[in-house]
Amino acid sequence: MSDNIQESFEGTRAAGIIAAGALDEVARIIKPGISTNDIDNLCYEFINDNNAYSAPLFYRGFPKSCCTSANHVICHGIPQNKILSEGDIINVDVTAYKNNWHGDTSRMFHVGEVSVKAKKLTDVTYNSMMKAIDILSKDITLGDIGSTIQTYVEQEGFSVVRDFCGHGIGRVFHQEPNILHYGKKGSGPKLKTGMIFTIEPMINEGNFETKMLNDGWTAVTKDKKLSAQFEHTVGITDKGYEIFTLSKKGLNQPPYST
Ligand code: MF3
Ligand code: CO
Ligand code: CO
């Protein structure tokens, strides 16, 4: 691989490890009674302790260091004093910025014991991301990613959110191309060695319609049913792909029993 690709992979790897490490810490504190601000403080401290910056903090005016999106919140929930209760499901999304490179990742967390349907939604969302990652190579197209996710998710009776997508990432947080989580097999441009982007499917229990809350950030399901999301930052190599945001502790999906 060229020097430039090697440099961007090394940079993204370092940022990705920090973002994933923050989520490993979140797994240790999630329980009924903590607030989403507690999660935010932990992410801020962890990223800071690792000599990195939190990319969301003050990004286009976003006020916090991570996104916390519970139950019917699809994405970009703002940490608050809200206390988590038994049965809640919540996505925590962290982006570390280290030596000018970004690593972006999110996972679902279960607060105490959650419903069977919440568990199924979590599992299907995680599997949809991993099935798409599994097929990554320089020989597939962007449409292959979307169609892999959409086909599987709809077969399981859930829907794929259209209003938000994955993105190229590197020195810039959000860049070309958009990575749609739905689409047609074989459509769109081919991937290329050296590309770095996120796959971050948002999957709804009901239909895929979204609504924006008055804070201008929080996206929720219009039908108020549950939504789930996972996110990895990945890179395309000559041989296949690399995932930059895997958990070093194997805490990639719930249950996170350690
Ligand atoms: N991390 C989110 C993503 O996956 C973006 C968060 S931007 C924020 O792209 F401003 F909402 F934090
Ligand atoms: Co992202
Ligand atoms: Co993210």
Image: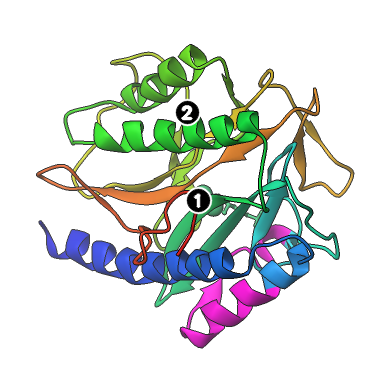
Amino acid of disc 1: Pro
| Image quadrant in which the C terminus is located | bottom left
Residue density around tag 2, few if under 14, some if 14–19, many if 20 or more, within 10 Å: many
For the residue labelled by badge 2, is the local secondary structure a helix, a strand or a loop?
loop
Disc 1 marks which residue? 255
Residue 76 appears in the figure: no
For the residue labelled by badge 1, is the local secondary structure a helix, a strand or a loop?
loop
| Image quadrant in which the N terminus is located | bottom left
The residue lying at 67 percent from left, 35 percent from top is 115
Disc 2 marks which residue? 181
Q: Is residue 222 left or right of residue 176?
A: right
Q: Quadrant of residue 183?
A: top left
Q: Nearer the viewer, residue 35 or 48?
A: 35
Q: Which residues are magenta?
A: 41-60
Q: Quadrant of residue 133?
A: top left
Disc number lying in front (1 or 2): 1
Q: Is residue 206 left or right of residue 242?
A: right
Residue 239 appears in the figure: yes
